[in-house]
Amino acid sequence: MIRRWAIVVLWLACIPLARAEPYIAVNQGLKCISCHTSATGGGKRNAYGNVFAQTQLPARTLRAEGKTGFWTGEVFKYLAVGGDLRGGWNRIDVPEEPQTSQTELNSFLGYIEIKAIPNYLTLYIDAKLAPGDVEIREQYVRLSISNGKFYIKGGEFFLPYGLRLQDDSAFIRQVPGINFNTPDTGFELGWEQGHWSAQFAVTRGAAENLQADNGRQYSLLINHVRSRWRVGGSLNFNDTDVGDRQMQNMFAGVKTGRVAWLAEIDYIIDDGSPTGRRKSWATLLEANTALKKGHNLKLGYEHFDPDTEVPEDQQNRYSIVWEYSPIQFLQARAGYRRYSGIPQNATQNREQYFLELHIAF
Amino acid sequence: MTRHCQFFCGLVMLIAVAGCSAGSGEGLNISGRPLSEGANIPLAPTLESIQANVFDPSCIICHSGASAALGLRLDSANSFTNLVGVTSVQNSSLARVEPGSPDQSYLILKLEGRASKGQQMPLGGPPIPQSTIDFVRQWITDGAQPVAGPMPTTAPVVVSITPGPDALIATLPSQIVAAFDQDIDASTVNNMTFVLRASGGDDLFDNGNDVPVVSSLVVLSMINPRLASFDLSGVSPVEDLYRVTLRGAGPSVILGLNGLSLDGEFTGALPSGDGTEGGDFRVEFELRGVQPTLQSIQDNVFTPSCGVSGCHTGPTGPVLPGGMDLSNAAASFASLVGVTSIEQPPELRVAANDADASYLIQKVEGRAAVGAQMPLGGQALDQETIDAIRAWIDQGASP
């Protein structure tokens, strides 16, 4: 056992420094599935992801005396668990409105992975445990074949589309409406080979409103991953009673020295608007600088054009976020976001300050 | 190379930041829409004001269009229809807006961050100031009236229906709800104009064997005159293809308050209509899976899994397994309901209205103290099927 862990640690020690979220994958030249149970990222970390998060992300790794090995999430051969807890302080200044601030538990997520037949058949559950009632976010069965080259999963899951940022308020997450608040039910086919990764999902397209829906939503995500860069694209088509919605995006990542860059551009055509067809753009540019081990500085710029037919309605968002991981399992985040939109809408011109504590295991 | 690449990426970001400025808002209202679509109006406890000052600027970024979150479209054409008197998807014990009761309105719980499910709305944005929410509260307290305006000059159309067109459902809902784009004449919503038929088992209609489904209550909502419902309580659920028809043509039709008949033609997308007054609205949905009726349980469980050769095939008698005859619905009823178990007397095989006390349930759930789980040697029944059997028993275990 000790020897096995020694090999893992030595291997990790050879990997250049990285910090968090999708850009961690850009920094490492790895696919999402390298660190997460889900091939499209997010949610429970696998054994490698857990060890990586304990040894490479934090400024220092604390070790109990006489203890060897790391938390891998594996309770025993057939069961693995994980979790994410986020809470903190948030202040929002809307021009000419009273300032609001609150300290709260944002979310406590729990993950269970039952490996019915290890490496082949998996049952996965992702649930929000707090605040409020327990809510299942993902629940699916996945069957992998050909050494994980192909898989099929069925159940409720987050759709494969674009960069899976943790921040659901980013334009590229909010505007397409595919984010951590909108799991869908159906099946997904996955393919992993060499530098390529692809997922195709057919789901109900109802954003949790199961009874009202009759249509189908098709999502396709393709990634080409190299050690220093990656490119990808997504397509999504939602056929609904009130019209069709077609979305497409391209995204890319590149590593230049200490900086990992992310970019995504989304184009959305929605026939379900009361004023007829509406076309929108949403974009993201993000630079993540590894200041030193345990510290990451994230600079973000986003642009949103809600309707290409309407001039002067565009919105921007600027972000600066410092992420600090002092020890394993723990991350502190401090950030500032500046929204810029049409002057007559105060909310579109707000400022946000936040401090967040994130515990991940 | 790295430096060049870094310089290039930084330059791209700088150009983007400098080149893509926010809109000036010239000629737009507070929601970023052209003033021709609606001018700015002050906050007031009216839907028109709430639409302009809350829903449009803060909600419709997610709650509009084809992929509206939870199917809840809050644009001006749909907000009243989708909110007032409509049961919440996240909390089925509450209406999204309950006229007269803001604290019983899920919309208020979501805006104030007091809902037990999901996050506070607007998602990712600043909470709506309480002073603004108070206007929403007042609108609800005042009865949640629709936007006051001139009488529509167009024929009413169907904007949504639940279950949705071509939906495949496992459980018959308590009611079918159709929503219209304008207020409907309540006197025209009845069993003649809101019609439900089952295909008769052949998935075909108008071939002589259609089965009309009669409802004891087909009405227009008293609190939302744009919602018509077809009550299904008491209707025996039978696996079949169902067709919902809302009459827009013929002697009895659904009329808007403007006297125009329903523009109902449905060609795959809502709202309905071809732009011309008249035309029936027809959609279908399928009910599949074991239903809480003896016939459905017989067809899906007893016949294929129990009444098979060498098992519960009769004739009725004191010796198991044959003595408990489950080979057809009549025999199953005679062998089960109110009949004392041979294995575990004095327990009843089926105690009407009490699934927990029914030995049949213990046997299929594998909890019986005697003998093996049923079906013997076969795959255990899934929980959905057992729940249907439980529901049949709890509803009286009728033949």
Image (tube, rainbow, N blue to C red):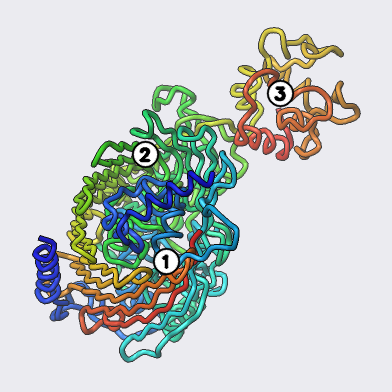
The secondary element bearing badge 2 is classed as strand
**Residue A248: x and y, percent?**
20, 51
Q: Quadrant of the C terminus of chain B?
A: top right
Q: Quadrant of residue B325?
A: top right
**Residue A45: x and y, percent?**
45, 52
Label 1 amino acid?
Answer: Pro
**Residue matched to label 1:** A58
Instruction: Name the front one of labels 2 and 1.
Output: 1
Work out whether residue A14 can be spotted. Answer: yes
At label 1, counting other C-alpha atoms closer than 10 Å, the crowd grade (few under 14, some 14-19, many 20 or more) is many
Check the residue under mark 1 and report the chain it is in. Answer: A
Q: Tag 1 or tag 2, which sits nearer the N-term?
A: 1
In the drawing, does residue B292 fall left or right of residue B105? right
**Residue A200: x and y, percent?**
30, 40
At label 2, counting other C-alpha atoms closer than 10 Å, the crowd grade (few under 14, some 14-19, many 20 or more) is many
**Residue matched to label 3:** B374
- Kindly indicate whether the residues beneath marks 2 and 3 are on one polypeptide chain: no
